[in-house]
Amino acid sequence: MGKARGNVPQNAREPQDDMLAGLRRSIDNIDAALVFLLAERFKVTQKVGAWKAESNLPPADPAREEQQIARLRALAADADLDPDFTEKFLRFIIDEVIRHHASVERG
Amino acid sequence: MGKARGNVPQNAREPQDDMLAGLRRSIDNIDAALVFLLAERFKVTQKVGAWKAESNLPPADPAREEQQIARLRALAADADLDPDFTEKFLRFIIDEVIRHHASVERG
């Protein structure tokens, strides 16, 4: 951090500065990885949805969701990520999945 | 899929069936990867937040956000992921980051 900042004079601290640009490139890399992982996750949950529809299982499974949330909160704490945010994040994803499953059921 | 299903009699299609259990193990693996990537992303955005606070830059940057959204929508389409969902996902993450930045500013 010190080296990069040493190259940036005080008056050059604009959104385009080198420090900010470097950090943003890292964010862009991570975001691409997140998108591809989410795509893979939805491929798996689509299989789950088709299987549930075929087996007459309900789209939502509250007991499974509770297990997922407890597990991810523990992983988040290990990784120094806010467990409350992680739980909100998982619920956001699960809500989307349930919408997909429900539409498979209706379809 | 056919092989695993061949091992599961019709009347055993419960939430604990082998097919569902296997798919859920894949989801759990992907979720752990998502959590660790998110932890890394927040490490980077904390650096961005500290830098912005120190440089008197505003926490939110609408032009940057538009670029991120356009890029991720294109990546999502490549990966066969719903671009609208991807945009909602990114806004969900960015909103959390802005809350963090705003609290760094106030702090």
Image: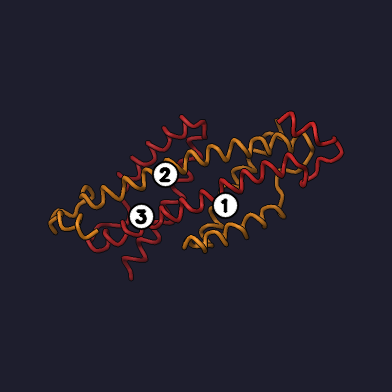
Chain colours: A red, B orange
**In the picture shown, does residue A106 fall above or below A40?**
below
Q: Answer few, some or many: residues within 10 Å of disc 2's Cα (few below 14, many 20 plus, some between 14 and 19).
A: many
**In the picture shown, does residue B88 fall above or below B99?**
below
Dot placed on the residue nearer the N-terminal end, 1 or 2 = 2
Image depth: mark 3 or mark 1 in front: 3
Most extreme residue toward the bottom is: A107
Q: Name the residue carrying label 3.
A: A44
How far apart are the two marked residues, 3 and 1, measured between alpha carbons?
21 Å
How far apart are the two marked residues, 2 and 3, measured between alpha carbons?
12 Å
Q: Amino acid at mark 2?
A: Asp
Q: Name the residue carrying label 1.
A: B90
Quadrant assignment, res A40: bottom left
Q: Name the residue carrying label 2.
A: B31
Q: Amino acid at mark 3?
A: Val
Most extreme residue toward the right is: A11
> What SS does tag 2 mark?
helix
Q: Residue at x 15, y 54 (%)?
A: B8
Q: Amino acid at mark 1?
A: Leu
Q: Answer few, some or many: residues within 10 Å of disc 3's Cα (few below 14, many 20 plus, some between 14 and 19).
A: some
How far apart are the two marked residues, 1 and 2, measured between alpha carbons?
17 Å
> Chain letter of disc 3?
A
Q: Is residue A17 left or right of residue A11?
A: left
> Chain letter of disc 1?
B
The C terminus of chain B sits in image quarter: top right
Q: Is residue A97 left or right of residue B62?
A: left
Horizontal and vertical percent for residue A65? 35, 45
Horizontal and vertical percent for residue B32? 42, 40
The N terminus of chain B sits in image quarter: bottom left
